[in-house]
Amino acid sequence: MSLRNRLLRAIEAGALPSSDFDLNKGRAPKPERLRDAGVLIAVVDADEPRLILTKRSSALKHHPGQIAFPGGKVEETDADVTAATLREAEEEIALQNVDVLGALSPHETVTGFNVTPVLGLVEPGYSVAPDTSEVAEVFEVPFHHVLDPENYMVESRVWRGQPRYFYTVPWGPYYVWGATARMLRALADRMNDGSD
């Protein structure tokens, strides 16, 4: 089955929304209203597919230096979450010509966002130009790496006085964790006919 068809099947499979709280018994108080955001899970459609990720600038106030998908908050001027995701991907890394396949189930973050992962294909030879005020680096990870559940680990840190558990899926020098790893794990489960 082609990569496109496998990704479309994963979108159509449907799944429950995921959350930063999935691995934790207690929940932090839920904000009165979650803010909508979107991230782009961009897969390079090559013989050996690759996933595009970013390393956030260390100068940012929120999540400095973390590994993330391109994306951000939905603004009033955005038609929908997909439009916001594509706008953010262009602003952050100048990524264009994304073949949007659809969206996965939303993910709730501890920071009060309802994040919709938008799944898209990018042709090999794409170009990027990171906005260095937001993005320190753009890099690729072999797609098969993030699709293999064996590559995921559960780790913990103390957060607001309590241990918080989260997924990680490291690649080389890159520590992919938290919401990014959780959304990738949900995609891996779908593409491997599992459940998240």
Image (cartoon, rainbow, N blue to C red):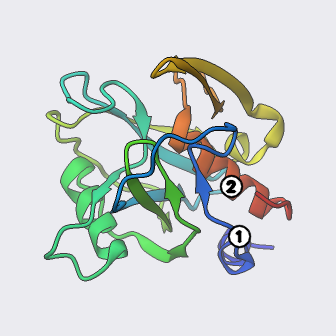
Image quarter of the C terminus: bottom right
Q: Earlier in the sequence, mark 2 or mark 1?
A: 1
Q: Secondary structure at mark 1?
A: loop
Give residue 19's position: percent from left, percent from top: 58, 51
**Image point 56% across, 43% down: which residue?**
20
**Image side of residue 67 versus residue 130, left or right:** right
Q: Rate crowding at label 2 as few (under 14), some (14 to 19) or many (20 or more) other CA atoms within 10 Å.
A: many
Badge 2 is on which residue? 186
**Image point 35% across, 73% down: which residue?**
81
**Image side of residue 157 versus residue 23, left or right:** left
**Image point 67% across, 70% down: which residue?**
7
Instruction: Check if mark 2's residue and mark 1's residue have beta carbons within 8 Å.
Output: yes
Q: Which mark is residue 121?
A: none
**Image side of residue 16 versus residue 118, left or right:** right
Give residue 169's position: percent from left, percent from top: 65, 32
Q: Secondary structure at mark 2?
A: helix
Asked where in the image residue 115 lies, by quadrant, the reply is: bottom left
From the viewer's side, name the closer residue of 160 and 38.
Answer: 160
Give residue 144's position: percent from left, percent from top: 72, 46
Amino acid, disc 2 = Ala
Amino acid, disc 1 = Ala
From the viewer's side, name the closer residue of 28 and 175.
Answer: 28
Image quarter of the N terminus: bottom right
Q: Which mark is residue 15?
A: 1
Eyeballing the image, is 167 above or below 41? above
The CA distance from mark 2 to mark 1 is 8 Å
